[in-house]
Amino acid sequence: MTDEAPYLVQLGDAQTAVVRALFDALPREGWDSCTVEYRKAGTVAESRVSVTGSDGTTVVKSPTPMVIALKRLRELMATQGRGAWLSVTVTAKPDGKCTFDYNYDTRPDWTVQPTDETYIEDLKKYPRPAEQIPDWYPRTS
């Protein structure tokens, strides 16, 4: 018998860590929604946090604890045999409701696109079954 919590409990805890870190950095009021875009491949990662209120949308600094929690969430989810997701969009509302939309297949919309080698390294670290590797994904020669 193991002392490790079941996967779904670990997943819930990991998602809660992301949301808690995000809410700790947001203002208590004055916003209607918040969108986090996080992309990772190999050692390359990008994060963008957009807060929307009555005065429009503002991009704010990504909280470091949230970025660390997103990295941990990706690592946890990659252990389930699907490889790692390439990006996630987290949408949060002031009432605490949040959604996570994971992208395993579409090339993320990077500010600076990672090299093919970065994607190949990521696939080596988090292998996927061949039929789950997107057509656009770089291959080794």
Image: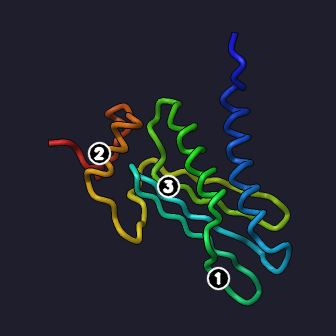
Q: Secondary structure at mark 3?
A: strand
**N-terminal label among 3 and 2:** 3
Q: Position of residue 92 (x, y in %)?
A: 73, 63
Residue 9 placement: quadrant: top right
Task: Tell me if mark 1 has few (under 14), some (14-19) or many (20+) residues whose alpha carbon lies within 10 angstroms of its own.
Answer: few
Task: State the separation of the CA atoms marked 3 and 2.
Answer: 16 Å
Sequence-wise, which precedes: disc 3 or disc 1?
1
Task: Name the N-terminal-most of marks 2 and 1.
Answer: 1
The colour scheme used to paint the residues is rainbow
Name the residue tied to disc 2: 120
**Contact check, label 3 and label 1, Cβ < 8 Å:** no
Residue 58's disc number = 1
Question: Is 53 left or right of 100, judged from the image as shown?
Answer: right
Q: Residue furthest left?
A: 141
- The amino acid type found where label 1 is placed reads Thr
In what element is the residue under mark 1? strand
Q: Which mark is residue 87?
A: 3
Which residue corresponds to the image point at 54% horizontal and 44% vertical from the top-left? 74
Q: CA distance from mark 2 to mark 1?
A: 34 Å
Residue type beneath disc 2: Ile
Which residue is most to the bottom? 55
